[in-house]
Image: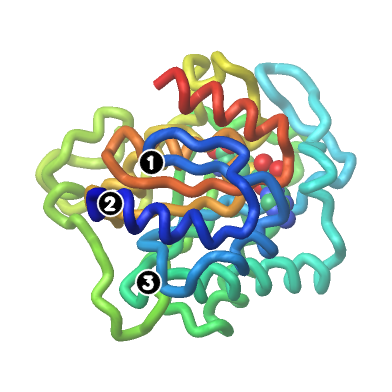
Amino acid sequence: MDEMLLSKQKVLAKVGSRPYFMKDNVALYHGDAIWLLNQLPENSIDMIFADPPYNLSNDGFSVHAGRMVSVNKGDWDRSKGFEGDYDFHYQWLDACRRILKPHGTLWVSGTYHSIYQCGHALQSLGYHILNDISWFKPNASPNLSCRFFTASHETLIWARKEKKAKHTFNYNLMKEGSWPEDKIKKPGLQMRSVWSMGTPKPTEKKFGKHPTQKPLDLLKRIVLASTNKGDIILDPFTGSSTTGLAAVMHDRKFVGIDMEKDYLELSKKRLLNM
Ligand SMILES: C[S@@+](CC[C@H](N)C(=O)[O-])C[C@H]1O[C@@H](n2cnc3c(N)ncnc32)[C@H](O)[C@@H]1O
């Protein structure tokens, strides 16, 4: 049995519940992220990408494709009040820190509704922030009220588990690589912390829609920047498993978790049709 498979089985066997789906180097689990994370062995994951609920399903309205649409994504996105939301972010970030390897890193994405709470919680837990990335969306939806600026970016915090650990950063690949999707990145110059990328293309939604799906270009860049071939990547809020697709495309292993079966079904279709 090769070393890659051994380490994968060590991680997956400890989860304590059967995977919802398994294929090659991918395992998807159905259930509550905090509970499942607590079943995994400590120091076992190289990188975590987390796109937690933004808690902005407040019965308001937004614009999509020129139409007025509800901002509600699902019950999983409803706010539990300031303290309830903070508590949730603190708990899943704590559970993630335990399972990260000492040199491991964590990415969290969010808007102003959630990202400051996540930033406070992760610093309180001892993570060390490496960067905050601004993902600029050139095709962001317009603002309906015309009473404030149009939200056109999301923030991604990149942090390592330990202040003194030696984390992975594929500097040369970021600097010299080809990034045709990003009009801001200049060839041969250092990769900066503002990334310009559109929202997911229609081809990325051909198997169905997730209301907060991330673009594949964004996850490809994150995977390539902060992991190496064979690394284990985990996404505790996997949704349509954009992270899983990016991981498999670049020969990494992937563990995804979601509490909604419909999203795991969508993930399965995407992963089986790569
Ligand atoms: C913002 S979406 C992630 C979208 C994903 N990045 C993608 O590209 O499709 C958050 C996901 O977390 C899931 N979720 C929310 N609370 C959860 C919990 N406590 N445990 C597991 N999954 C949860 C939701 O069902 C939703 O699919």
Q: Secondary structure at mark 3?
A: strand
Asked whether the viewer can see residue 142, the reply is no
Residue for point 82% across, 69% down = 84
Residue for point 17% across, 53% down: 190
As drawn, 93 above or below 251: below
Q: Which residue is mark 1?
A: 25
Q: Position of residue 252 (x, y in %)?
A: 31, 45
On the picture, is 48 further left or further right than 212? Answer: left
Q: Residues within 10 Å of mark 1 (few under 14, many from 20)?
A: some
Q: Position of residue 7 (x, y in %)?
A: 34, 58
Residue indicated by mark 2: 4
Quadrant hosting residue 149: top right
Residue 43's quadrant in the figure?
bottom left
CB atoms at circles 2 and 1 under 8 Å apart?
yes
Residue drawn at (44%, 40%), measured in percent from left and top? 26
Judged from this view, the residue extending furthest toward the front is 1
Give the class, few, some or many, for how many residues have Cα within 10 Å of label 3's Cα (few <14, many ≥20). Answer: some
Question: Of discs 3 and 2, which sits in the foreground?
Answer: 2
Separation of residues labelled 3 and 2 (CA atoms):
16 Å
Q: Along the horizontal axis of the image, is 176 left or right of 45?
A: left
Mark 3 lies within 8 Å of ligand 1 (Cβ measured): no
Q: Quadrant of the C terminus?
A: top left
Q: Which residue is mark 3?
A: 101
